[in-house]
Amino acid sequence: MLLYIFYGLYTSIAAHINQWLPQKILKRRAEKKVIKTIHRAYREVPFYKKKYDEAGVDINGIKTLDDLKKLPLLTKDEVRDNFPEGIVARGTNIDHCHYSATTGSTGRSLPFVFSHKTHIFYIITNFRVYTMIGYRPWHKSVYVKYTDSKVKRFGPFFRTGHVLSILPVKEQIEKIKQEKPDILIGYASLILEIARTVTPEDLKVIRPKRISVNSELSTKDQRDYISSVFKCPVYDEYSTEETWMIASQCKEHNYHIFIDNVWVEFLDENGKEARPGEPGEIVLTTMNSPVMPFIRYHIKDLGRYSDKKCRCGRGFPVLEAFDGRRDDSFILPSGKFVSSLKILNTFTMYIKKYLHLMEEFKVVQEKKGLIVIYLVKGKEYKKERFQELIDQLTRIFGEPVKIEVKIVKSIPDPGRVKRKAIESKVKR
Ligand SMILES: [Zn+2]
């Protein structure tokens, strides 16, 4: 325990210094860590050894970041199919790891683990994201999420509150009023939904000094709208649950890529490095999770990097924009807006509650009053369990909407654009 505390303190200081180092030094360090990660994975993770041997990779020839292109990409299906035996490092006791699963936005669950040491590093990178935009340890942070986070408070420091994402929006607003956040943190579409619903009376009580939105693409217009409602700046953050922090905006509203956590490649259609300002497929390599490293992980998000320097002085490279994800919220017959993520989180909750309830799903709003769920049943599918999920959705909608369930064998993949689990065909 004491060791973890020392490690946490040391890592906090290092992580905070890192952001101000010159980009050259950060890149050199990243290169060392990435190459070390690859060689270690080849030795310790059976999946990578097999994959690279089959692809004819000369592992001793992987010495620089330029050599990364010699390695085949890692897909989400490979992670799923090889978890845990293949893709977790040999000798790892999974019971001693932090275990989680994500549905991403594609509707297929993806399990992963990382060590407690890695988890500490990840939490510290979270705090770095918030301190970048002015958060201080004595501020109250309130998260709109589908789970409680486990950060401990120390007296007046690190005070946090939680608002469950799957609650109806009016209940969320009541909870936020009780919590009185200095910083409000949550999924972009959920905060947008809250911003569209709060009344001037609510806003007399809810007065955050800053808002951080995450986990899905939000447009600048949406963030500006949230900012105009709450009368405070809104910053965006980009991460995945399995690789953790990728990039986030500083006070200048530029995205900085955290190359002390993850190496990011932007690839064009031919798999070559995209030019600055050109959209490329984002490919990630984690460097702090030897228990389950993600190497050249193809997440099917699109983004553009920039060779510009930011006025804030941070050395982390700048990411110009994301292009891959967009808001697929539902608009109900009354005009009520329901965030796509609220629906996605409901599925995630039931996937966590009933393992193997479903293999895959897709939810399509065909018309304002009609929602169709395409479902690939899991090996422990039970109709009454799935009905619980539908009842929860009905509660969220809060008005008559027909929900149809269609059992299918598989859900087609549309290719280059990231497949979405939640989609609306209703024109706005
Ligand atoms: Zn900056």
Image: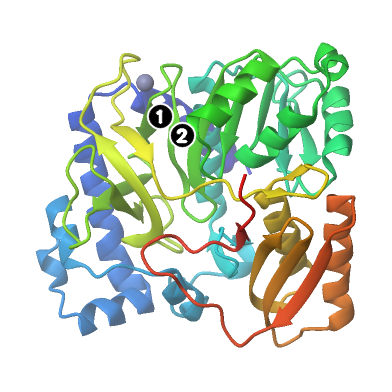
Residue density around tag 1, few if under 14, some if 14–19, many if 20 or more, within 10 Å: few
The x, y position of residue 138, in whole percent, is: 69, 16
Q: Which residue is mark 2?
A: 11
What residue appears at the point 63 percent right and 25 percent down from the top-left corner?
226
**Amino acid found under the numbered disc labelled 1:** Ala
Residue 90 in sight here: no
Q: How many marks?
A: 2
Q: CA distance from mark 1 to mark 2?
A: 5 Å
Instruction: Evaluate if marks 1 and 2 touch, with contact meaning CB atoms under 8 Å apart.
Output: yes
**Amino acid found under the numbered disc labelled 2:** Thr
Residue density around tag 2, few if under 14, some if 14–19, many if 20 or more, within 10 Å: some
Q: Is mark 1 within 8 Å of ligand 1?
A: no
In the rendered structure, the answer to whether residue 373 lies left or right of residue 328 reads right
Using the image, determine if residue 294 lies above or below residue 56: above
The x, y position of residue 215, in whole percent, is: 56, 45
In the rendered structure, the answer to whether residue 384 lies left or right of residue 425 reads right
Q: Which residue is mark 1?
A: 14
